[in-house]
Amino acid sequence: MLDLTGKNALVTGIANNRSIAWGISQQLSKAGANIGVTYLPDEKGRMEKKVRDLTEPLNPSLFLPCNVQNDDQVTATFDAVKESWGRLDILIHCLAFANRDDLTGDFSDTSRQGFQTALEISAYSLVKLAQQAKALMTEGGSIVTLTYLGGVRVVPNYNVMGIAKAALEMNVRYLAAELGPGNIRVNGISAGPIRTLASSAVGGILDMIHHVEEVAPLRRTVTQAEVGNAATFLCSDLASGVTGQILYVDSGYEIMGM
Ligand SMILES: NC(=O)c1ccc[n+]([C@@H]2O[C@H](COP(=O)([O-])OP(=O)(O)OC[C@H]3O[C@@H](n4cnc5c(N)ncnc54)[C@H](O)[C@@H]3O)[C@@H](O)[C@H]2O)c1
């Protein structure tokens, strides 16, 4: 039932070999899924090359630029999915952004522009991608996004990203309710802190990781592959009755009071 052979999976958010999306795409591929990759394009084409080289072993059948702030690129992405695959089964939303200045210091200093940017890229993008994906998920499907405990509890320095994750987690529930009748399931994974490009922008990330290593029931933080395994489960028939949920993959840290 964990076999994803014949399933078409579009993965967003791979930036480098530390990316959680890279861990997820490797596990989806191991389970047999046909992988499509999107990357955030830059003027010099650096990201394209880096992500292309990294993902080559998975033999992605689609490789597309997709800045979620650019509606034309989002539309072009799903047009390409329709043309090449005809049908989409799995969408992995694994991206977020906030200005570095807004990920340290006082939350009340967040600027209007910083707030809008964080919410647009990190939360609205799931709505935008789901809007396009639902028409292609003609045989049902699974949408998985990545969130963090800072969306439900106050975590020092996480600041505006916590607000974005709170919005993202509500997006999961509203989308699950809307898309459920079409057998499209929508879930989130709340991952424990992992060293990545995005998390390095959060002030004190290493302290957060050390704290988890001391306090979490498993006395360690999690790996990208463990998050990838949970995502693969959520995308498989093993999770056919699961939607609208946030699954904690955090070594159990979330249950602790002290
Ligand atoms: N690393 C952690 O500790 C941790 C914990 C819980 C949740 N998460 C979440 O996991 C997800 C992936 O982050 P990561 O830690 O793997 O870091 P990462 O830096 O590897 O991935 C973030 C991705 O977002 C992409 N991105 C940023 N702006 C974009 C835009 N406008 N359009 C398209 N893509 C854009 C980047 O290109 C990058 O690939 C994020 O949602 C993050 O909040 C991370």
Image (cartoon, grey):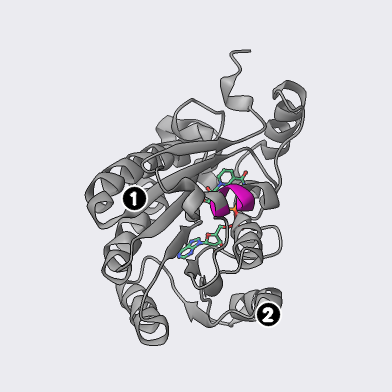
**Three-letter amino acid code of the residue under disc 2:** Glu
Q: Position of residue 244 (x, y in %)?
A: 36, 41
**Three-letter amino acid code of the residue under disc 1:** Gln
Q: Is residue 54 above or below residue 161?
A: below
Count of marks placed on residues: 2
Circle 1 packing at 10 Å, graded few (<14), some (14-19), many (20+), is some
Q: Is 231 inside the magenta-drawn segment?
A: yes
Tell me: 145 left or right of 105: left
Using the rendered view, name the quadrant where residue 212 is placed.
top right
Q: Is residue 69 above or below residue 199?
A: below
The residues colored magenta run 228-232
Tell me: 64 left or right of 164: right
Q: Is 10 inside the magenta-drawn segment?
A: no
Which residue is the site of mark 2? Answer: 56
* SS at mark 1 in the image: helix
Q: Is mark 1 within 8 Å of ligand 1?
A: no
Q: Residue at x 60, y 42 (%)?
A: 202
Is residue 96 visible in the rendered image? The answer is no
Using the rendered view, name the quadrant where residue 151 is placed.
top left
Tell me: 153 left or right of 170: right
Q: Which mark is residue 88?
A: none
Which residue is the site of mark 1? Answer: 116
Q: Residue at x 64, y 39 (%)?
A: 193
* SS at mark 2 in the image: helix
Is residue 107 visible in the rendered image? The answer is yes
Q: Position of residue 71 (x, y in %)?
A: 30, 72
Residue 122 or residue 129, whichever sits in front: 129
Q: Position of residue 145 (x, y in %)?
A: 46, 51
Q: Is residue 226 above or below residue 7?
A: above
Real-space Cα separation, disc 2 to disc 1, in angstroms: 35 Å
